[in-house]
């Protein structure tokens, strides 16, 4: 492992559902499903789920902290679980499905404890936060069939995630925070685009021909969406990108309006309509074209990123 890489370990119930949120994000080197917290060496899946080993299902993440700080990993972890459940997660009950953050050094311990405290005082949950923060113990990778399950068995994985109750819980408690006075904070065009799935005129919007270095953030949540490094002139009159900075911050939906079948792109946290993604982008860059509305985004020049609190993303321009 590179000296610049670090390791994070989280138990969040079924490990199938804990790989996807971290996998393929910027700075993530690998995500391995496995078992930790107990004292039995090299346990099997059946041994762990019998709740006799002391182990929990967990994921171990190798990451580059210069790109993906540990604080962001912890924030992502909270958003996958019910931190008030002491007996398991959703339909999965028992010791092996309990939640915990396993810290590997004092810095991780402090970040995790601060994050838990912030969550407790936020008022998001009325019940106590029971997720434990524990020193890391030996981690044993799970069997091959459990690695990257969300990719290898995507249909069954989606059914399981929905049927277990996890998907609904996440949408209700983490993705649908109420946005007070949102209409007063947006221009009429910004509101029409983000809240009513509107589309601004081509070639008559703020960023379609912007060539300055910087990042594009969600107009409501401030989450980073795209970088000028992936922006290109698609000739369509709207800002177009080959890929997002972090897929985790976006979600896609089938759009059948206007007699077409398209893939709509929305921001995950604010649930704002951003635009659509098409398969007619540059082949040498993956073949995708994220066609976005300027009104759904705010551009932050590279020179202003540190001042505006986005210094973590300056790595994009190195």
Image: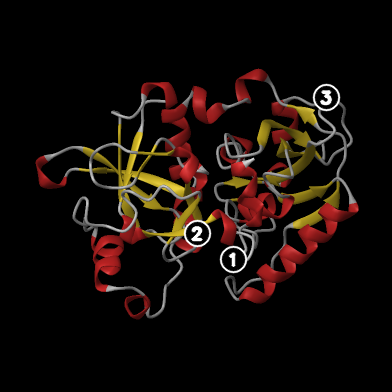
Residue 300 is marked as 2
Percent from the top left, x then y, of residue 255?
23, 44
- Residue 61 in view here: no
For the residue pair 283 and 304, the one nearer the viewer reads as 304
Report the disc number at residue 42.
Answer: 3
Q: Is residue 187 left or right of residue 14?
A: left
In the image, residue 185 above or below residue 218:
below
Tell me if label 1 and label 2 are in contact, CB under 8 Å.
yes
**Closer to us: 151 or 267:** 267
Residue 90's x, y, as percent? Answer: 56, 51
Which residue does the numbered mark 1 point to in the structure image?
308
Alpha-carbon neighbours of circle 3 within 10 Å: few (<14), some, or many (≥20)? some
- Tell me the crowding category of disc 1: few under 14, some 14 to 19, or many 20 or more residues within 10 angstroms, Cα based: few
Disc 3/disc 1 C-alpha distance (Å): 47 Å
- Disc number lying in front (2 or 3): 2
Q: Earlier in the sequence, mark 1 or mark 2?
A: 2
Of the numbered discs 2 and 3, the one sitting upstream in the chain is: 3
In three-dimensional space, the C-alpha distance between marks 2 and 3, rounded to whole angstroms, equals 49 Å
Q: Nearer the viewer, mark 3 or mark 1?
A: 1
The kind of secondary structure element at disc 1 is: loop
Q: Secondary structure at mark 3?
A: loop
- Tell me which corner region of the image, top left, top right, bottom left or bottom right, holds residue 35: top right
Q: Which residue: 62% across, 25% down?
A: 146
């Amino acid at each position: 492992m590179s000296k610049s890489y670090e390791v994070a370990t989280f138990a969040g119930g079924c490990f199938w559902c804990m790989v996807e949120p971290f996998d393929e994000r910027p700075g993530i080197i690998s995500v391995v499903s496995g078992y930790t917290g107990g004292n039995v060496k090299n346990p099997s899946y059946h041994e762990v789920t019998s709740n006799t080993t002391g182990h929990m299902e967990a994921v171990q993440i190798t990451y580059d902290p210069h790109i993906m700080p540990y604080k962001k990993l912890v924030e992502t972890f909270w958003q996958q679980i019910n931190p008030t459940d002491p007996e398991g997660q959703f339909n999965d009950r028992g010791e092996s499905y309990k939640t915990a953050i396993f810290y590997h050094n004092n810095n991780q311990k402090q970040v995790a404890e601060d994050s838990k405290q912030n969550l407790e005082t936020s008022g998001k949950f009325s019940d106590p936060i029971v997720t434990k923060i524990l020193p890391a113990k030996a981690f044993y990778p799970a069997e091959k069939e459990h690695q990257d399950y969300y990719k290898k068995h995507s249909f069954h994985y989606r059914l399981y995630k929905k049927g277990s109750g996890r998907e609904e819980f996440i949408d209700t408690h983490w993705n649908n925070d109420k946005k007070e006075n949102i209409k007063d904070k947006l221009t009429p065009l910004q509101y029409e685009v983000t809240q009513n799935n509107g589309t601004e005129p081509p070639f008559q919007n703020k960023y379609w021909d912007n060539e300055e270095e910087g990042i594009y953030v969600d107009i409501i949540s401030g989450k980073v969406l795209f970088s000028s490094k992936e922006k290109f002139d698609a000739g369509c009159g709207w800002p177009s990108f080959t890929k997002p900075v972090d897929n985790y911050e976006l979600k896609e939906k089938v759009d059948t309006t206007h007699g077409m079948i398209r893939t709509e792109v929305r921001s995950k946290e604010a649930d704002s309509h951003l635009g659509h993604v098409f398969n007619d982008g540059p082949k040498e860059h993956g073949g995708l074209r994220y066609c976005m509305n300027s009104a759904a985004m705010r551009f932050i020049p590279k020179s202003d990123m540190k001042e505006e609190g986005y210094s973590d993303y300056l790595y994009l321009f190195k």
